[in-house]
Image (cartoon, coloured by chain):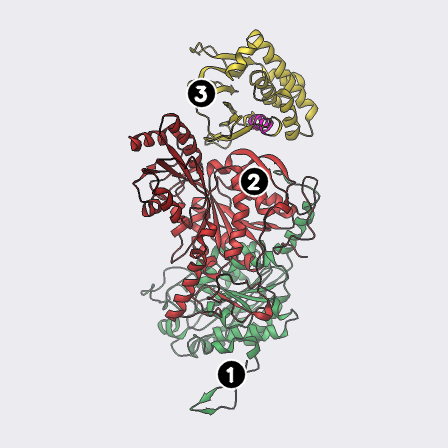
Amino acid sequence: MRSEIRITGLGGQGAITAGNILARAAVLYEGKEAVMTEGYSPYVTGGWSRADIVISTEPIDYPLVTKLDLLVTMYQEGLDLNLKMIKGNGAVIAEKQLVSFSGVTRKDLRMIPVPATSIAESLGRKIAANVVLVGSIAALVESVSIESLKKALADRFPKAIEFNLKALDAGYELASKATGEHMEEAKQVV
Amino acid sequence: MRRSGEVKVSATTTINKKNTSSGALKPGTYFMMGNFACVEAAIMAGCRFYAGYPITPSSEIFERACVRFPEVGGSAIEMEDEVASAAALIGASYAGSKAMTATSGPGFSLMMENIGLAFITEAPLVIVNVQRAGPSTGIPTLVGQGDMMQARWGSHGDLETIAYSPSSVQEFFDLTITAFNTAERFRTPVFVMADQVIGMMWERLKIPSIEGVEVLQRKVMDAKTRAKPFDYANDFIPMPIVGTGTNINVDSLTHDYRGYPSTDYTVSESMIGHLLGKIRRHAEEIWKWDGYLLDDAEELVVAYGSTARSALAAVKQARANGIKAGLLRLITPWPFPDAIIERYSRRVHNIVVPELNYGQIVHPVRENAQCPVIGINRAPGALMDPTTIVDALEVVAN
Amino acid sequence: MSRPVTDGGREMIATKHPLDPMIRAERLPNIWCPGCGIGIVLAAYVNALTKSTKPHEKNVCISGIGCTGRIAGYLNLDTYHTTHGRAIPFATGMAVAKPDLEVFVIAGDGDISTIGGNHLIHAARRNVDINVIMVNNFNYGMTGGQHGATTPLNARTHTSPYGNVESPFNVPYLVSAAGASFVARWTALHVIQVTKAIKRMMEIKGFAFLEVLSPCPPTYGEYNGYPAALDMMKHFRERSVVDNGADLSTVSVATGADDRIVVGNFVDRKRPSYDELLTELQARTGKKSGALTEA
């Protein structure tokens, strides 16, 4: 079972870090195989960056994503550009303030807006919006549990772990509620 | 004030909590970038000298070396260019250090001059090339496999080179250790021909305990028995190390058994015979390859590096489509495993060779195969899509 | 290392030179032309070595390619004849990996300041603990006399047959500006001063640089008015001015009959050497780990 996730944002939003935590959790704490590759726009600052994660129960041959089970985006263009890469009945998590779903014509997608920035801000640090989004991913992805993500997060941020765990939990709870009764259905596709 | 480890691990190595006493990372499972794994492998292999020049997509190797080498009692220094980096490695190698650098195409081009010097002076060292799209500056951030022939023929004159081509983060780690061992055994420069995809991907890495890793120590010449420093009758000659009293001249000119320059034809013949022969005579010992579904394969894919991952996916897909496909993954493109290609080519109908270049490794494959060989060549800049290879298999199979 | 010298079957009286143990006498005669100054530099280096307090095996000589590049091979030391222009980075790697060595690079002007010019300034900037002797004969001698970065303006060579249109490097000025701990220039005539300068270089911690101007009778000399073996030496004797405190911006070398040649030990200063700074860095590393240790 292979699933493909892309997390994308503008420079400084922490897309790569988010992808790293997710893939690390899969490999180290779920015993699964995962590959993360990074992509950047040609600008050193201000451009987009993305983490592509393939998670599988089997050894991974082709390491890049081809059809996304889940897209996580923190900027509008990230949605527009990657929309066609999402599988039928796939899912999108988007930063609510920065991304609008209004232009999406595809009806098959599960679209979950997460106010990650305002949640992170209310916790005291706007910069942790990416961690909130990682929490939201756990609500949709069966291959990585919230417990494993907490461990991976602790690896990555050993010093600010309490704060980051709050951000992770907040994202997880919000996305769990948002998916609501569709949770089981959502997990089937991701 | 002994700063650089002379092959043996320095007694003054800093011990920090996540490292073992040797300075290597503790054994266990890690999630790591390929370029980082390469550095950890080098440390485990006893490398304590790095001279480099930053270049995408290999810079993480240099950066991590600058963090890790001083921690383990080594040095990682930044040179003014890759010409200087390669020259510094040979100096450090003759000082007794295991030495390495990492680069990408443009830097690899600049290193060719001193790769020749390392070869003729028989200086063991390791050069990692994280290949990107070329020619010239090309696309610095994107994958290519255009330096494979350069690794074989790039430096002028007759060279016999050794190159490893990893297809995963784990293999990048494992082959870096192997590369150091091979360099020491053969007293010659060894290449690890990685590529941008392998260098920059993050994957599972199992770091073994250092006791379980074979690390070859250099055979060092005893100052008292220095009579024939370049004994061409012997494939494996102990290396004279500077400052130990061997008083040996090490020369870039064609040199005789004493290390003295000579224009005598018999000297040229015996020196070149030795330099090429020590590798050619032991090529089978160097060869590494990996097979997938070879037993009943009728159509064979020969691939290496990141393209081998595409090829593996393609072979699975082709099987699902009813084609008896198999994969032969070349782990050592150089010296070329000619007998292996010859053996497998007798069992299959066709061989296809996917590469992110316009035809490099396909040539020695064709030279040795007893069946038709078809190159699948794509411009560098993107990893080959498995369907490209599946399509080619469909064509040759029907 | 004594070598029997015969003359028509009759053994000659002098069979041994006092410096024989320091050189590979079996490799003689050397390749240098009559009147060449490189042998003088070789002798000065060997004389300085005999006074060195370092154990003999810790002395290393590294050279590049060209006439001067052949010096290394005649020395009974650990010697390295490397690639053209790359002796300095080779030496940098060796000195960093094994700091107890006394490393000398002896090479020509083309090697050090032209093809290797970039390596020269960077080694001086880092203040790598190596010693560089640049024998400057104003042209590429081994390849038959072509102009390089030290060939004076208007001088004639095979590649400047109508006169050189390039201005030469003032190498002591360049190396001093780049940061060397020690900078000197003498000529092949100044045997005592060259030997003393080499001894001082052995004591210097950091980058030490010595330019030795040398005659090249068959090529540079031939085309620029100094064709006989001693012509350039006479010129050195007549036109050299010793000025240790010279303003280095004014010490460019030209070989016209009226040109002054300023020589001296110009720079002798204390700056932290690369070696010392690397050792300090290593000591610091144990306390604070760097930014990228995250696995």
**Which element carries disc 1, helix, strand or loop?**
loop
| Residue C7, placed above or below residue B226 | below
* Residue that numbered label 2 is attached to: B37
Looking at the rendering, which quadrant does residue C21 occupy?
A: bottom right
* Residue that numbered label 1 is attached to: C3
Q: Amino acid at mark 3?
A: Asn
**Which element carries disc 3, helix, strand or loop?**
helix
Which quadrant, please, contains the N terminus of chain B? Answer: bottom right
- Residue C272 image offset from top left, x and y in percent: 64, 55
Residue at 36 percent of width and 25 percent of height: B321
The one nearer the camera, B26 or A37, is B26
* Residue that numbered label 3 is attached to: A82
Question: Residue extending furthest bottom?
Answer: C10
Chain on which label 1 sits: C
Q: Which residues are magenta?
A: A17-27
**Which element carries disc 2, helix, strand or loop?**
helix
Residue at 44 percent of width and 62 percent of height: B274
Tags 2 and 3 on a common chain: no
Chain on which label 2 sits: B
- Tell me the red chain: B
Chain on which label 3 sits: A
Tell me if I can see residue C190 in this picture.
no
- Residue B208 image offset from top left, x and y in percent: 61, 41
- Which SS type dominates the magenta stretch? helix
- Tell me the yellow chain: A
Q: Amino acid at mark 1?
A: Arg
- Residue B109 image offset from top left, x and y in percent: 42, 49
Instruction: Give chain C's shade.
Output: green
